[in-house]
Image (cartoon, rainbow, N blue to C red):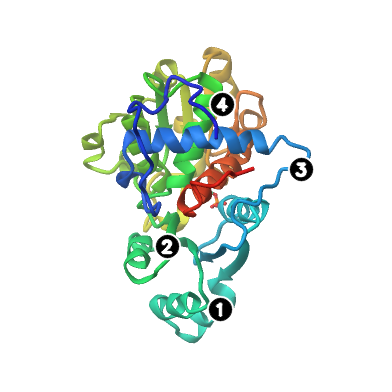
Amino acid sequence: MSKPSSADAVSTPDYTFGQQHLIGLQDYSADDIRFVLQQSLYFREVLNRPVPKLPTLRDKTIVNLFYENSTRTRISFELAQKRMGADVVNFSSSSSSVNKGESLKDTIRNIESMKIDMVVVRHESPGVPQFLRRCVDAAIINAGDGAHEHPTQALLDMFSMQQVKGQIKNLKVVIIGDILHSRVVRSNIIGLTRLGAEVMVCGPRTMMPLFVHEMGVTVSHDLEACLEWCDVAMALRIQLERQKGALFPSLREYHERFGIKMKHLERYPNMTVMHPGPVNRGVELAGDVADSDRAIILNQVTNGLAVRMAVLYLLSGRMDERVG
Ligand code: CP
């Protein structure tokens, strides 16, 4: 497997990865996170091969349990599983017996009786992955639970930052937008601060959780000051579907105050722009910013495939075997 190749290498010489699930980065130590990122380097290289496939998950059966919409995460997990030779079953709540009233527990018990090894789950309710960990005999991977955590998104974000900026330690990262409803921000704050980054959050007061500063971040409502300070600006999607009332006057006004525009790229030439997707063009980012070479949004997506391959490998129980 890949050797440490960045300043964010695992700090303990006799470190071993002991995790069996990925519910949230809250459960992962700094070395666990560094180790996943190191392993991801190997899988990122595999993606550049003429045949980007490995037999690592042969004989493993994985269920992708998506109760909430997804494009990137769902396709990325499925592609990662197939590239590693797993048997993959896709479950979508809209076309399942959930619509006939079957509970989550009954659904998963029925799926479990078909002998599965891993479950990737996305759900609108925070805590569903923890619930599955208690009642299912399989490795559980959280693909996003409500406004709680989205750990593989944060891992791929950190991997992408390492790729562009060299290391996470001492990196200045501002996360902009709907902090209140974002699971991406929660996982990123945990991961980035554990690896020694300085993190700022920026957005309207109505979208700022009251105690967010207790997570070790600085709070700002001044976009210009944040962009002047940062190495990386990560814009978040405005999650209109999770908002119970209007939290800002209009999308146009939001863009005016908190949207990243071409003038910002010109003013701050070393700033890298990120977004987990899906992007609301003209809201979080001007369209030309999203399309510029300063935005690494599509690199994030490619890196997501490598990071998810690494996570699947590490949680598959196949760590003692050669991966290819
Ligand atoms: N970033 C992200 O989670 O995107 P999807 O909702 O499309 O999976």
Q: Say which element carries label 3.
A: loop
Q: Residues within 10 Å of mark 4 (few under 14, many from 20)?
A: some
Alpha carbon distance from label 4 to label 2: 31 Å
* Nearest-to-viewer mark from 2 and 1: 1
Image position, residue 267 (x, y; %): 53, 13
The residue pinned by badge 2 equals 124
| Residue type, label 1 | Ser
Residue that numbered label 1 is attached to: 96
Residue topped by disc 4 = 261
State the separation of the CA atoms marked 4 and 3: 39 Å
Q: Position of residue 159 (x, y in %)?
A: 51, 32
Callout 2: SS = loop
Q: Say which quadrant the C terminus sits in.
A: top right
Foreground mark, 4 or 3?
3
Tag 3 or tag 4, which sits nearer the N-term? 3
User: Would residue 255 be visible to someone looking at this image?
Assistant: no
Q: Residues within 10 Å of mark 3 (few under 14, many from 20)?
A: few
Is residue 141 or residue 317 the one in the foreground?
Answer: 317
Quadrant position of the N terminus in the picture: top right
Tag 3 or tag 1, which sits nearer the N-term? 3
Can the viewer see residue 99?
A: yes
Answer left or right for 157 relative to 216. Answer: right
Q: Secondary structure at mark 1?
A: loop
**Residue 34 falls in which quadrant of the image?**
top left
Give above or below for 53 relative to 91: above
**Whole-number angstrom distance, CA of label 1 to CA of label 3:** 34 Å
Mark 1: give few (<14), some (14-19) or many (20+) Cα within 10 Å: few
Residue 209: horizontal and vertical position, in percent?
28, 43
